[in-house]
Image: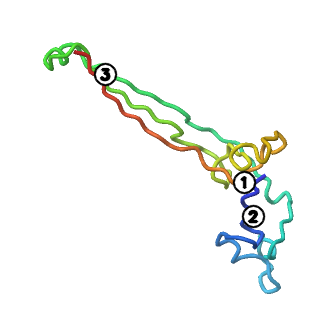
Amino acid sequence: MNLTSLQLFSGDSNATRDILNSWTPTNTDTNIPRAAVRQKTISSRFVEDGSYIRLRNIALGYNLPADITEKLGMDNVRISISGQNLLTFTNYSGLDPEVNFLGSGGSGNQNTFNGFDFGNYPNIESFNFSVNLKF
């Protein structure tokens, strides 16, 4: 349930550009409901398929050959790089298909909010690079 979309289409806060194409008596050929201030009607319109495939973690490392490390006056040189949350493939329109309610399960951390997307942040994409030198 994409409650963030419901909030953006309700007219009581910020909205997306899509609201400009909402239903009016002169604009009847649209799939966006009539704009109404503070009207939050939950419907199947905001239920989305949250299926996704994600590349969560990857790490690559390389030890330089002994003949190169000897020339550098070292016993070992290891170079590595890792990344987290690099790719997500989904048709979900929200920020992240791993939804939650207000970041921690909603008020009181109740499990009744599972599957509701509202007030969450997307997973952070990060990269780490390291060089390990052994003398």
Q: Is residue 33 left or right of residue 4?
A: right
Residue 48 percent coordinates (x, y): 76, 52
SS category of the residue bearing label 1? loop
For mark 2, what is the residue? Answer: 7
For mark 1, what is the residue? Answer: 118
SS category of the residue bearing label 3? strand
Q: Decide: few, some or many residues near mark 2? Use Cα within 10 Å; few <14, some 14-19, many ≥20.
A: some
Using the image, determine if residue 127 lies above or below residue 133: below
Between 119 and 79, the one lying in front of the other is 119
Residue type (three-letter) at the residue carrying disc 2: Gln
Disc 3 and disc 2: Cα gap in Å? Answer: 50 Å
Q: Mark 1 and mark 2 in contact (Cβ < 8 Å)? A: yes
Q: Earlier in the sequence, mark 3 or mark 1?
A: 3
Residue at 33% from the left image edge and 22% from the top image edge: 62
Q: Decide: few, some or many residues near mark 1? Use Cα within 10 Å; few <14, some 14-19, many ≥20.
A: many
Asked where in the image residue 14 lies, by quadrant, the reply is bottom right
Return the mark for residue 21: none
Using the image, determine if residue 75 lies above or below residue 59: above
Residue 60 percent coordinates (x, y): 41, 27
Disc 3 and disc 1: Cα gap in Å? Answer: 43 Å
Q: Earlier in the sequence, mark 3 or mark 2?
A: 2
Q: Earlier in the sequence, mark 2 or mark 1?
A: 2
Return the mark for residue 78: 3
